[in-house]
């Protein structure tokens, strides 16, 4: 979190330190939207709670944030307080692929089965193509849905046979 905030602090060409003893002074005055994982919807929800800066978020009640945002509330609270011990990834390196997924935000809520099927097939094709590129097959298909109020649920299904075929993945997601 320190590296991300520091790299964005004075773009494009400045070098910024973001040491632990500087974090509150430099980061807490920034808009909460500058924090990693705070997108538009989360920013609106935080704003409605009176949270406008990273400092506001850091001083918030973590339990309330979890009630309003789920487990992400706890993660954001920790980030706002500078609690992150994950290592900074070296340039031009990548972790081994553990899962393949894709997501999208639709411009409006989907209301018909046909709309859902179209989006599922588009996402499934992207996932299946990457599975094939890497010589992988999947055994589990999971869908996650979040509405404009940030209500979220996930469901998953095990495939009888591992697959990298778009149709099989999309149909499992639809089921």
Image: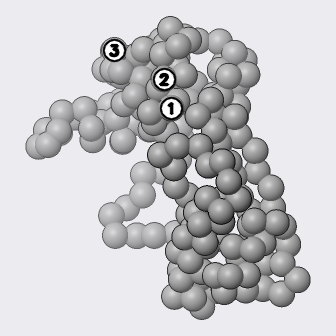
Q: Is 119 situated above or below 128?
A: above
**What secondary structure is found at the residue carrying circle 2?**
helix
Provide residue 88's location: percent of width, then percent of height: 42, 51
Front in this rendered view, residue 13 or 137:
137
Q: Residue at x 65, y 62 (%)?
A: 114
Name the image quarter holding the C terminus. Answer: bottom right
Q: Residue at x 54, y 70 (%)?
A: 122
User: Splitting the image into 4 quarters, where does residue 157 fall?
Assistant: bottom right
Q: Alpha-carbon distance for marks 1 and 2?
A: 5 Å
Q: Earlier in the sequence, mark 2 or mark 3?
A: 3
Q: Nearer the viewer, mark 3 or mark 1?
A: 1
Q: Is 90 situated above or below 137?
A: above
Name the image quarter holding the N terminus. Answer: top left
Q: Earlier in the sequence, mark 3 or mark 1?
A: 3
Q: Is 90 situated above or below 166?
A: above
Q: Which residue is mark 1?
A: 41
Q: Which residue is mark 3?
A: 29
**What secondary structure is found at the residue carrying circle 3?**
loop
Front in this rendered view, residue 136 or 144:
144
CA neighbours of label 1 inside 10 A, class few (<14), some (14 to 19), many (20+): few
**What secondary structure is found at the residue carrying circle 1?**
helix
Q: Is 152 situated above or below 67?
A: below
Q: Nearer the viewer, mark 2 or mark 3?
A: 2
User: Splitting the image into 4 quarters, where does residue 66 fall?
Assistant: top right
Q: Residue at x 52, y 19 (%)?
A: 46
Can residue 127 be seen in this snapshot? no
Report the disc number at residue 44.
2
Q: Residue at x 75, y 44 (%)?
A: 153
Front in this rendered view, residue 120 or 64:
120
Circle 1/circle 2 CB separation < 8 Å? yes
User: Splitting the image into 4 quarters, where does residue 70 fall?
Assistant: top right
């Amino acid at each position: 979190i320190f590296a991300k905030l520091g790299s964005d602090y004075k773009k494009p060409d400045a070098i910024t330190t973001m040491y632990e003893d500087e974090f509150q002074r430099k980061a807490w005055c920034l808009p909460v939207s500058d924090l990693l994982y705070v997108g538009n919807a989360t920013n609106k929800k935080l704003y409605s709670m009176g949270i406008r800066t990273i400092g506001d978020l850091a001083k918030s009640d973590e339990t309330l944030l979890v009630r309003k945002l789920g487990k992400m509330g706890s993660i954001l609270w920790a980030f706002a307080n500078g609690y992150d011990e994950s290592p900074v990834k070296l340039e031009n390196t990548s972790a081994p692929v553990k899962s393949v997924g894709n997501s999208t935000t639709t411009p409006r809520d989907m209301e018909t089965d046909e709309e859902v099927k179209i989006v599922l097939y588009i996402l499934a094709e992207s996932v299946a193509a990457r599975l094939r590129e890497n010589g992988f097959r999947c055994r589990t298909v999971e869908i996650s849905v979040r509405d404009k109020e940030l209500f979220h649920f996930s469901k998953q299904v095990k495939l009888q046979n591992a697959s990298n075929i778009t149709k099989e993945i999309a149909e499992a997601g639809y089921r």
